Image (tube, helix red, strand yellow):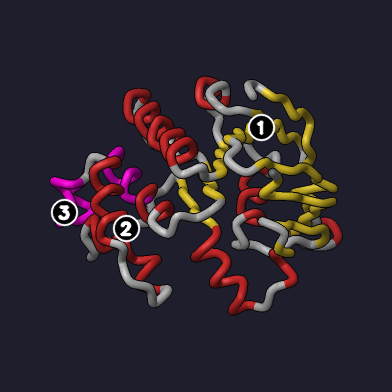
Amino acid sequence: MELLRVEHLCKTYGKGENRVDALRDVSFSVEKGEFVAIVGPSGSGKSTLIHLLGGVDVPSSGKIYLDGTDVYAQNAEQLAIFRRRQVGLIYQFYNLIPVLNVEENITLPLLMDGRKVNQKRLEEMLNTLGLSKRRYHLPNQLSGGQQQRVSIGRALINAPSLVLADEPTGNLDSKNSQEIVELLKFSNREYHQTLIVITHDENIALQADRVLAVEDGQIARDEVIRR
């Protein structure tokens, strides 16, 4: 069953001599529960693509449909709600609030959305992330791997249908990197969440169901690794 459909997506920055075509006529679809890795050299358009998929940036032209909804046909308020409820974003830089502890950082999206925290899900999330004993620690009291776990918890607490991760292991050593990938794969399997990960790490890409290679703002290769 199709969850995500991208049609003729284009993104241009600047004008005249300063014009940069970050994405050029990109089209693809992703099935519900699929794990897709996006690879490609720096400047190829990978991060631009993930920002458009997550509703963080606006395309110059083209369409994105998530679960049948035309993402950019929504008004600003609808788009903000869409981002909070339908998409979980994980970045290379953890973007944690320094004055909030682990539990507060994880539950922040729910509180911003005016929704009650599901304590059972929170406890399950803390246990899965290995953060139960760190729940009252501030970000500066955590290792890099632990901080990235908090950012993953924050992205997953809303049970989004689509999880987008932009180089989530870029600042971590190989051991922590693989642990983070295993956590993402667990959420993909356990909660049937669709997972799209940008990575430079070939080992991570090969653990995906499918690899999209982006070059010069276009899909250069779409390869199924496993079904």
Instruction: Give coordinates of residue 136: x percent, y percent.
Output: 15, 56
Amino acid carrying label 2: it is Ile
Q: Magenta stretch containing residue 43, yes or no?
A: no
Q: Which residue is mark 3?
A: 137
For the residue labelled by badge 3, is the local secondary structure a helix, a strand or a loop? loop
Left or right of 106 in this view: 15: right
- The answer for how far apart the CA atoms under marks 3 and 1 are is 36 Å
* Residue 80 seen in this snapshot: yes
Q: Circle 2 sits on which residue?
A: 106
Disc 2 versus disc 3: distance between alpha carbons?
Answer: 12 Å
- In terms of image quadrants, where is residue 40? top right
Which mark is first along the chain, 1 or 3?
Answer: 1
Q: Position of residue 62 (x, y in %)?
A: 82, 58
Q: Amino acid at mark 1?
A: Gly
Q: Mark 1 highlights which residue?
A: 40
Left or right? Give the position of 135 relative to 146.
left
Q: Residue at image x 52%, y 45%?
A: 193
Label 2 or label 3, whichever comes before in sequence order: 2
Amino acid type indicated by mark 3? His
Find residue 214 and report its horizontal and vertical position in percent. Answer: 72, 35
Pick the residue in front: 153 or 143. Answer: 153
Element type at mark 2: helix
**Label disc, if present, on residue 173 of the rendered structure:** none
Query: Magenta segment range?
Result: 132-151
Question: Eyeballing the image, is 112 above or below 57?
Answer: below
| Residue 18 is at least partly visible in this image | no
Query: How busy is the neighbourhood of tag 3: few (under 14 within 10 Å), some, or many (20 plus)?
Result: some
How many numbered circles are shown?
Answer: 3
Judged left or right of residue 83, residue 150 is left
The residue positioned 60% from the left and 37% from the top of the image is: 34
Q: What is the CA distance from the residue labelled 2 to the residue labelled 1?
A: 31 Å
